[in-house]
Image: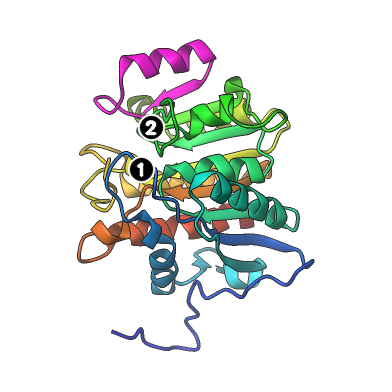
């Protein structure tokens, strides 16, 4: 069904393609990784689905006065990286993100499974990493379960991330193994579990995460939507009951994105082909795009 048109109610999305050499505040880029996922997924369909969902929302922040992000920020959409899986695809994604990051304050990568975190963080020149995720993503090999390990061990010299500059928010019981928990501890990764977030509060956790991952460096934010309660994100293959509420994810994203050291972010692990009939998972991912923009506008 077509959305109603109201000249006094401008919608989010449908942002123009970038003009080469022209500076932007925020740049969208689809990175539809999916071929190395350890669970069956149609995540390659998700960038298009997020773009389709964005016009369901306005780009306006409530306040005195209200702020229209379409007017406050220069936003562009660079389309998708073609076939970003495999060695050649990863390099295409790295090169494209690097090109866009040179002219933008924040690159927002629309995934795709979580393997996109590896090329996007590299392309953005990230020196620190914050993940919002129920899982460590420290597996061996090449998959959507290994991007954090790969950024520590497999990236070329000069592009690896010091594990002591990695913060993982939302790690959940019954979603990981003791072996990977031990690996994270041995490497010095700061792990803030789901329970700890709820005990301490979001503002306190955001402040610590930025301090640890920042230290004057460029930060990449990985938003794995399967950290959210499965009732809210049925389109995430690995989501579990009892994860973050949707509002908690949104608050974490906006709070982290408000820091000027955050130069890139990705949205991962949404399978648009497996979503509920009402599209609730994709719609939350689209709102996370807007929360990233809200954080950027608040800088």
Q: Secondary structure at mark 1?
A: loop
Give the x, y percent position of residue 297.
Answer: 63, 57
The reply to whether the magenta stretch includes residue 173 is yes
Q: Which residue is mark 2?
A: 170
Looking at this view, name the residue that lies furthest to the right: 21
Which of disc 2 and disc 1 is earlier in sequence?
Answer: 1
User: In the rendered structure, which segment of residues is drawn in magenta?
Assistant: 171-193
**Residue 108 in picture, x, y percent from top left:** 56, 55
Residue 184: say if magenta: yes
Residue located beneath label 1 in the image: 37
Mark in the foreground, 1 or 2: 1
The structure residue drawn at horizontal position 61% and vertical position 75%, both measured from the top left corner, is: 16
Q: In front: 243, or 154?
A: 154
- The Cα atoms of the two marked residues, 1 and 2, are separated by 21 Å
Does residue 205 appear anywhere in the picture?
yes
Q: Pinpoint residue 60: horizontal percent, then vertical percent.
A: 51, 69
């Amino acid at each position: 069904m077509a959305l109603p048109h109201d000249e006094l109610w401008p919608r989010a999305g449908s942002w123009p393609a970038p003009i080469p050499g022209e500076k932007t505040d925020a740049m969208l880029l689809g990175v539809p990784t999916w071929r190395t996922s350890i669970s069956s997924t149609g995540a390659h369909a998700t960038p298009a689905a997020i773009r389709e969902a964005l016009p369901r929302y306005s780009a306006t922040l409530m306040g005195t006065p209200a702020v229209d992000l379409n007017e406050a920020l220069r936003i562009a959409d660079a389309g998708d990286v073609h076939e970003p899986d495999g060695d050649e695809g990863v390099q295409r994604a790295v090169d494209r993100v690097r090109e866009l990051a040179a002219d933008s304050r924040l690159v927002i990568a629309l995934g795709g499974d979580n393997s996109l975190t590896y090329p996007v963080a590299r392309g953005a020149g990230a020196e620190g990493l914050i993940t919002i995720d129920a899982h460590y993503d420290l597996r061996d090999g090449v998959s959507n379960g290994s991007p954090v390990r790969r950024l520590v061990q497999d990236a070329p010299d000069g592009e690896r991330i010091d594990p002591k500059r990695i913060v993982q928010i939302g790690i959940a019981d019954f979603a990981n193994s003791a072996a990977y928990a031990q690996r994270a501890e041995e490497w010095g990764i700061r792990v803030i579990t789901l329970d700890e977030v709820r005990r301490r509060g979001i503002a306190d956790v955001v402040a610590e995460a930025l301090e640890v991952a920042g230290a004057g460096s460029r930060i990449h934010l990985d938003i794995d939507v399967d950290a959210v309660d499965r009732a809210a994100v049925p389109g995430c293959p690995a989501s579990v009951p009892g994860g973050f509420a949707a509002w908690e994810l949104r608050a974490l994203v906006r709070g982290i994105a408000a820091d000027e050291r955050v130069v890139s972010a990705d949205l991962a692990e949404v399978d648009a082909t497996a979503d509920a009939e009402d599209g609730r998972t994709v719609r939350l991912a689209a709102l996370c795009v807007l929360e990233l923009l809200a954080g950027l506008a608040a800088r």
